Image (spheres, rainbow, N blue to C red):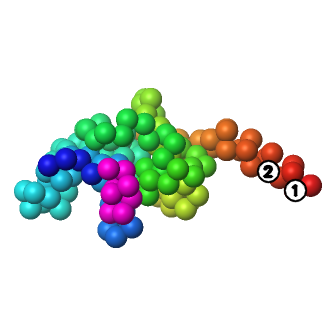
Amino acid sequence: MSTPTLSEARKLFQTSHMFVVCGTCPKFYEGKAQGKSVCTGVACGGPISRKDYPEYSGDVKDFSNLCFACGSEDTLAYAQVSGSSKKFGLCKEHLEIIDTLVSGQRGIESQVKVMIYPRADRVIEKFKEAQHVL
């Protein structure tokens, strides 16, 4: 079975809220073929679980400019797990949701932190747009 395209994964997100990262990974479909409701990745997970999708094996190599939840290219920020070089983009809607979830976990004793950074290029872009309005 071939791995779904990003476009197909976006449609899957719209119907089932399956994050695009998972929707583009063959391990998710291997799990479904085995009758499981989860992927075959044993220790996989994203920033919500303080991981960086260590077992991801799909075709998308860089999620920094894509919202890792819905696949939108209109990202405002990115999440990064401490100790990892991987960045996962966040659109406005999912930035708010992810920030709330991560904030709720801050009381948990953990060596792993999830940092959310604004995308400098988008901040500058929005500033320039505002200047044109003035």
Task: Tell me residue 55's x, y (percent).
Answer: 25, 38
- Three-letter amino acid code of the residue under disc 2: Glu
Residue 6 part of the magenta segment: yes
Residue that extends furthest to the right in the rendered view of this protein: 134
The residue at the point 73 percent across, 44 percent down is 125
Q: Nearer the viewer, residue 20 or 84?
A: 20
Residue identified by numbered label 1:
133
Q: Nearer the viewer, residue 20 or 108?
A: 20
Which quarter of the figure has residue 134? bottom right
Q: Secondary structure at mark 1?
A: helix
Task: Tell me residue 127's x, y (percent).
Answer: 79, 47
Q: Nearer the viewer, residue 23 or 88?
A: 23
Task: Tell me residue 84's x, y (percent).
Answer: 42, 31
The residue at the point 14 percent across, 58 percent down is 32
Residue 129 is marked as 2
Magenta range is 5-12
The residue at the point 52 percent across, 50 percent down is 73
Cα–Cα span, label 2 and label 1: 7 Å
